[in-house]
Image (tube, helix red, strand yellow):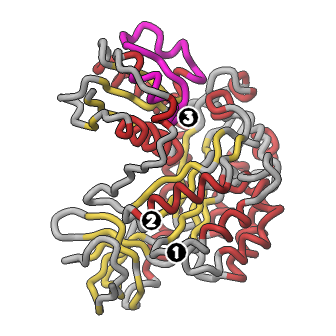
């Protein structure tokens, strides 16, 4: 069988698709283009109404006997995909779903084969980044979020399995290991372990690689913050923290059921910065949450000015079915749009200034992806993106000179190579 997987949404979703692809390949199935595929698998996302509409349009374009609809939409909002012609609807993808997919196309697969230790994780010719899903589900109780409906409560993957997965990736040539979860800081809470303990084992693995820790919620990161600062001392871990704040207003945070205050968040940022002044930060902010006043939004702007994140993922609030917040008054779209633009303008100014400080410096980078033309994409020690002209080969670690900057990335030339 020839198959094609199209993925939407978060890094975890892409990790789910990767696992399913690997399992299908182990069974002898062949990945191909969407035009030639016998099975077209769409891994969906339900995080916002806008994303849902976009995916539903795509599903209608693809509907037919070869379409398999998977992921968060059929899992959390099954009614949304009713009426779309398809061969099968699945929940969250994983390697065991390969059996369901193959069965639906009349291909018999043994459960023993699915446990085959042979790992076919050969890196793509233009990308040496690999995703490792370390947990499924969520530990939080956010009033606006549909993730728990889609993925359930937290289920941490065993450390031994994660380490085996990581080792196979490194052996296949992967140089960037991306740890993915709905909340990476929650890993281990259900199995008597913790994220710093997992990282301590990962960095002992032989090989040349770096680990990017995925999104960590403040309320689960706070109890392990001290141990995490020790983990970031390792050169094998990017000095990068993705910690979503969602709002700078304590009143809004309480309605969101986030479990911390804006001051808690700022203290955590400052604690990390005291230890690692060069730490790169990303955060998420929801604008237009029900009841958010202009004063509440001003507090979000002020918090961003104080925290000075390198990246802000901005989401305009949209109600999700069967969430506690869905019953609250949804403010006009024009207000959300205007606030989104103001926050984006602030972020671009902060990010532009942050990145300008790198210009003229020589930095060692890790080349992880091919870029456009003759350029290559790389990451600094703190995960800042660099585009290298006439770039060095994938997987190399050259020293580059930063020549220009913009809010989104740096550009550089090779100062001298390093294998």
Label 1 crowd (10 A; few <14 / some 14-19 / many >=20): few
Q: Which mark is residue 96?
A: none
Is residue 353 in sight in this rendering? no
Question: Is 245 rendered above or below residue 99?
Answer: below
Q: Along the horizontal axis of the image, is 161 left or right of 345?
A: right
Tag 3, which secondary structure? loop
Q: Earlier in the sequence, mark 2 or mark 1?
A: 2
Question: Is 238 rendered above or below residue 123?
Answer: below
Q: Which residue is label 3 attached to? A: 47
**What is the CA distance from the residue labelled 2 to the residue labelled 1?**
9 Å
Instruction: Residue 8: give x, y in percent of width and height.
Output: 43, 37
Residue 41 part of the magenta segment? no
Is residue 408 in sight in this rendering? yes
Query: Quarter holding the C terminus?
Result: bottom left
Label 3 crowd (10 A; few <14 / some 14-19 / many >=20): many
Q: Nearer the viewer, residue 13 or 326?
A: 13
- Residue lying at 45% horizontally and 75% vertically, measured from the top left: 208
Q: Nearer the viewer, residue 97 or 292?
A: 97
Q: Which mark is residue 170?
A: 2
Instruction: Residue 223: give x, y in percent of width and height.
Output: 83, 62
* In this view, the mark in front (2 or 3): 2
């Amino acid at each position: 069988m020839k198959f094609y997987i199209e993925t939407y949404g978060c890094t975890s979703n892409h990790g789910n698709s990767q696992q399913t692809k690997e399992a299908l390949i182990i069974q002898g199935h062949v990945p191909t283009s969407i035009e030639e595929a016998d099975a077209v698998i769409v891994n969906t996302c339900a995080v916002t109404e806008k994303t849902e509409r976009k995916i539903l349009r795509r599903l209608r374009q693809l509907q037919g006997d070869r379409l398999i609809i998977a992921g968060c939409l059929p899992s959390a909002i099954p009614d949304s995909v009713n009426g779309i012609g398809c061969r099968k609807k699945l929940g969250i993808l994983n390697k065991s779903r390969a059996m369901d997919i193959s069965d639906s196309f009349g291909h018999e697969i043994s459960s023993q084969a699915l446990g085959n230790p042979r790992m076919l994780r050969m890196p793509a010719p233009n990308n040496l980044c690999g995703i490792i899903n370390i947990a499924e589900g969520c530990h939080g109780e956010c009033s606006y979020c549909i993730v728990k409906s889609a993925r359930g409560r937290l289920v941490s993957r065993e450390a031994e399995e994660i380490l085996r997965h990581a080792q196979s990736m490194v052996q296949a040539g992967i140089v960037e290991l991306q740890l993915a979860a709905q909340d990476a800081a929650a890993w281990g809470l259900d199995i008597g372990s913790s994220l710093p303990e997992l990282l301590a084992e990962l960095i002992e693995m032989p090989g040349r690689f770096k680990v990017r820790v995925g999104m960590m919620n403040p309320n689960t990161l706070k109890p392990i913050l001290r141990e995490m600062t020790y983990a970031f001392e390792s050169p094998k871990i990017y000095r990068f923290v993705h910690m979503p704040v969602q709002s700078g207003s304590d009143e809004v945070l309480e309605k969101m059921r986030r479990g911390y205050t804006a001051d808690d968040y700022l203290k955590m940022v400052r604690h990390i910065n005291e230890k690692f002044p060069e730490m790169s930060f990303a955060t998420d902010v929801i604008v237009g949450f029900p009841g958010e006043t202009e004063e509440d939004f001003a507090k979000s702007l002020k918090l961003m000015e104080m925290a000075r994140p390198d990246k802000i993922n901005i989401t305009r609030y949209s109600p999700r079915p069967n969430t506690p917040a869905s019953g609250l008054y949804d403010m006009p779209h024009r207000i959300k749009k205007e606030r989104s633009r103001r926050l984006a303008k602030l972020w671009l100014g902060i990010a532009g200034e942050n990145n300008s400080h790198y210009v003229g410096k020589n930095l060692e980078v890790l080349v992880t992806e091919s870029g456009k033309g003759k350029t290559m994409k790389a990451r600094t020690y703190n995960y800042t993106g660099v585009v290298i002209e006439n770039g060095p080969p994938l997987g190399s670690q050259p020293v580059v000179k930063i020549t220009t900057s913009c809010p989104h990335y740096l550009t550089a030339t090779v100062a001298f190579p390093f294998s």
